[in-house]
Amino acid sequence: METKPTTSLFLCCVFIFLLISQEGWRKAEAERVFTITNHCQETIWPAVTPGASFGGGGFVLKPGQSMVFNAPIGWSGRIWGRTGCNFDRTGNGKCLTGACGTSLQCSGGGETPASLAEFTLAKLDFYDVSLVDGFNLPITIKPLNGQGNCSVAGCDQDLRKNCPKELAVKTASHGGKTVACRSACDVFNTDEYCCRGQYGNPSLCHPTYYSKLFKQACPTSYSYAYDDPTSIFTCTAADYVITFCSSRSQTVCTYHHNKLICSGSTGLKLMLKTWWSVTFALVSLLTLSNYM
């Protein structure tokens, strides 16, 4: 007879734990909300591949504009910005940087150089910003409402301003202004810069003079092929805000389940959720003890 209360309390705790855990699994299996925002002073044309869940893979954003999409679990792809584009009414045209052929909607990867936001969505999401293929726009990834590390990834510095002249992409139509910064691999095409051949492994492929310049300016971005430890991040059940030309500390927002969620509120929400869970458990245990 004396063991029954203990057994009941144990079963109650297990039930509460399963309820909380089940909620976490449901969130991990839900779609991810992607908000893509242009804080640049110029119009850009974001591109996404695969783009079926992102308006076909290409669209236009004027300064200050945003677009919101839902991506399913299992989606793995990349997002980048195109600049200096001119498309006709049928969606055919050209871009100065990041072009994916002559179409507004991309069905494949873009031309280098381009700053890339990369994602693999699963129960545990992986994401990063890569400058391995060069740089054309500042870009950051900020997870919201997620669980885990969920650090901000990306490059909020404009590398075009201090791009080494041997890597600089200039166009006469922009008065000789640097519109992008190529990678050393793209320019010199050697095994050492491209981490291939005998350099095709992390023990022999090391940071170079040029990748160190990228890394110094953007410490949470991939600067060369084996830059994993400080460049790839994970998060569970988050919404993602991809912002062009903004600072890492800038407040960003996402619209999830008819609610506006902004950066800086996650800690409060987590604290309230934890408080509710603990309160529910205590009330349940106290109610159960009154019946014993």
Image (cartoon, rainbow, N blue to C red):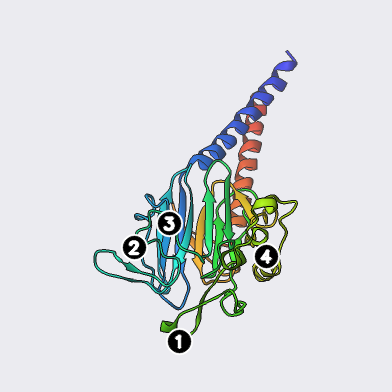
Find out whether the residues at labels 3 and 2 contact each other: C-beta distance under 8 Å. no
The residue carrying mark 4 is 219
Report the Cα–Cα distance between label 1 and label 3: 29 Å
Left or right of 227, for residue 56: left
| Foreground disc of the pair 4, 1 | 1
Amino acid type, callout 2: Leu
Tell me residue 48's x, y (percent): 43, 56
Q: Secondary structure at mark 4?
A: loop
Local crowd size for mark 4, using a 10 Å CA cut-off: few (<14), some (14–19), many (≥20): some
The residue carrying mark 3 is 48
Local crowd size for mark 1, using a 10 Å CA cut-off: few (<14), some (14–19), many (≥20): few
Q: Secondary structure at mark 3?
A: strand
Q: Secondary structure at mark 2?
A: loop
Q: Nearer the viewer, residue 234 or 118?
A: 118
Residue 231 sits above or below residue 139 on the image: above
Report the Cα–Cα distance between label 1 and label 2: 25 Å
The residue carrying mark 1 is 175
The residue carrying mark 2 is 104
